[in-house]
Image (cartoon, rainbow, N blue to C red):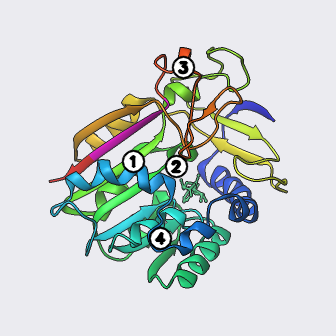
Amino acid sequence: MSMDHVSVDWDRARDTNRANWDDRVPMHEGAYAVDELSDPAHRSDVVRDDLPVLTPWLPDGTLADLDVCHLQCHIGTDTVSLAREGARLTGVDFSPAALASAAGLATRLGLDVTWVETDVLDARAAVTGDFDVVYTSIGTICWLADLDRWAAQVAGLLRPGGVFFIRDGHPALYALDETADELVTRYRYFPDGTAQQWDDAGTYAGDGTVANTRTFEWPHPLSEIVNALLDAGLRLRRLDEGRTLPWRFSPRMEDTGDGSWAWPDADRDRVPLTYTIVATRD
Ligand SMILES: C[S@@+](CC[C@H](N)C(=O)[O-])C[C@H]1O[C@@H](n2cnc3c(N)ncnc32)[C@H](O)[C@@H]1O
């Protein structure tokens, strides 16, 4: 695995990333807990952890009967988990392979979900209708160059009174060296306009290799994320930081036993692993 800082235009970066994400799908189908979803009571670990933070902001404290747009829905494990709360789901992703997998999963589970293939930065134009909730969680905006454009899509998709939810890896975590045996920084926290160009044949879940190994990511400080949402007209309601993560960022991380990972005890209070934001549209 290698990384360089490069200047790249968005269309080329996006298309390069899409080829890589298409390639990851078969590995993720085998590694995500897809089979557990055949139990109607089961929810993905991500949705299980997000619901208690999201639902207090909903009019009746439940997703039931609400229109929910799930941005960057990947193979649909979180999307169908949200649908099982009684919501009408639209899943958005730019990967046709991921959406085909997600659609197959929803059909097998007997759930009616609308799937939209688009760059999330064009989501408002591509998706029909507006939404009570826009949801995106874990491994999303690091793939996007322009958070102002992203936040404009989010605000445009929400109805007045609608709720936006995001949980993701904390930018302070992303600055750390994932290979080191102590907490040391390796990557920039503040962006300089360049992308991180990665070359990696593996993925975070499952064995095997991808043919399209190159990806582009962008560091986004917490201030940039919050200010993009505020500038898009959203009202910040909640900002939380977490000590656990639903993937193993570093080999030093310990399995907490509930689908999450954390630093060893001595480091657990030293750096946030996730942030969660709830924002609303007036
Ligand atoms: C790590 S997954 C996030 C979803 C969820 N946490 C999961 O693991 O199932 C990242 C998703 O973002 C999608 N993605 C990346 N860049 C995108 C873009 N510009 N527009 C739409 N989807 C994008 C990928 O195809 C992938 O499905």
Disc 4 is placed on an element classified as helix
- Depth check, mark 1 against mark 3: the one in front is 3
The answer to which of 257 and 112 lies nearer the viewer is 257
Quadrant for ligand 1 reads bottom right
Q: Which residue is rendered at x = 23% and y = 40% of the image?
A: 236
| Residue 151 seen anywhere in this rendered image of the structure | no
Q: Which residue is rendered at x = 56% and y = 36% of the image?
A: 256
The answer for how far apart the CA atoms under marks 2 and 4 are is 18 Å
Residue under circle 1? Answer: 166
- The x and y percentages for residue 227 are 32, 35
Q: Going from the N terminus, do you reach mark 4 or mark 3 first?
A: 4
Q: Which residue is rendered at x = 35% and y = 54% of the image?
A: 51
- The x and y percentages for residue 216 are 66, 43
- Depth check, mark 1 against mark 4: the one in front is 4
The answer to which of 111 and 219 lies nearer the viewer is 111
Residue under circle 4? Answer: 80
Badge 4 crowding class, 10 Å Cα cut-off, few under 14, some 14 to 19, many 20 or more, is many
Disc 1 is placed on an element classified as strand
Amino acid carrying mark 1 in the image:
Ile
Q: Going from the N terminus, do you reach mark 2 or mark 3 first?
A: 2
The answer for how far apart the CA atoms under marks 1 and 3 are is 26 Å
- Depth check, mark 4 against mark 3: the one in front is 3
Question: Dots 4 and 3: beta carbons under 8 Å?
Answer: no
Q: Which residue is rendered at x = 68% and y = 70% of the image?
A: 97
The answer for how far apart the CA atoms under marks 1 and 2 are is 9 Å
Q: Which mark is residue 275?
A: none
